[in-house]
Amino acid sequence: MASVFTKIIKGELPSYKIFEDDSVLAFLALDQVNLGHTLVICKEEINHWTEVPAETYAHLHKVSQKIGKAILKAAGSPRVGQMVAGFEVPHYHLHLIPAWSIPDLDFKRAKRRSDEEMKQIQAEIIKHLDAMK
């Protein structure tokens, strides 16, 4: 059975897309730990980060670094934390979370945001990402 992320990749479920190429997709997390919380996933449905092909893994992290720089500017945070947990969806994904302190990375803080807030931070991240090209 396809993961929820595979359904997003195929366009069967909506997302607030940040970036996409042939092997990677980045979109805002549905439940935002902090506004700008982005998931970066490989398009191939792979359960665990240790199973991701080295080339794909390296590319995903290179893309994540650029997105992280855009999130820093869009969110105005001093840091963007990374987290790989993988319990909620069996499809490798890297969380990029704007943070001001360690407690800002607590998943208990995650909450749904309004469509307006999501579209606004999406546009800001994309604007800063595009400025890096």
Image (cartoon, helix red, strand yellow):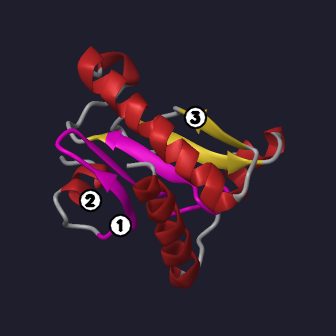
Q: Which mark is residue 15?
A: 1
- Please state if 103 lies on the left or on the right of 109 as rendered: right
Q: In the figure, residue 111 lies in which quadrant? A: bottom right
Locate residue 131, reporting x and y percent. 45, 56
Considering the numbered disc 2 on the image, is that residue within a helix, a strand or a loop? helix
Disc 1 marks a residue whose amino acid type is: Ser
Dot 3 or dot 1, earlier in sequence: 1
How busy is the neighbourhood of tag 2: few (under 14 within 10 Å), some, or many (20 plus)? some
Please give the range of residues in magenta. Answer: 14-41
Pointers 1 and 2 in contact (C-beta within 8 Å): yes
Dot 3 or dot 2, earlier in sequence: 2
Q: CA distance from mark 3 to mark 1?
A: 20 Å
Locate residue 71, reporting x and y percent. 58, 52
Can you see residue 31? yes
| Residue for badge 3 | 83
In this rendering, the count of numbered labels is: 3
Disc 3 marks a residue whose amino acid type is: Met
At horizontal 59% and vertical 71% (from top left) the residue drawn is 112
Q: Which mark is residue 8?
A: 2
Relative depth, front residue between 65 and 7? 65
Pointers 3 and 1 in contact (C-beta within 8 Å): no
Dot 1 or dot 2, earlier in sequence: 2
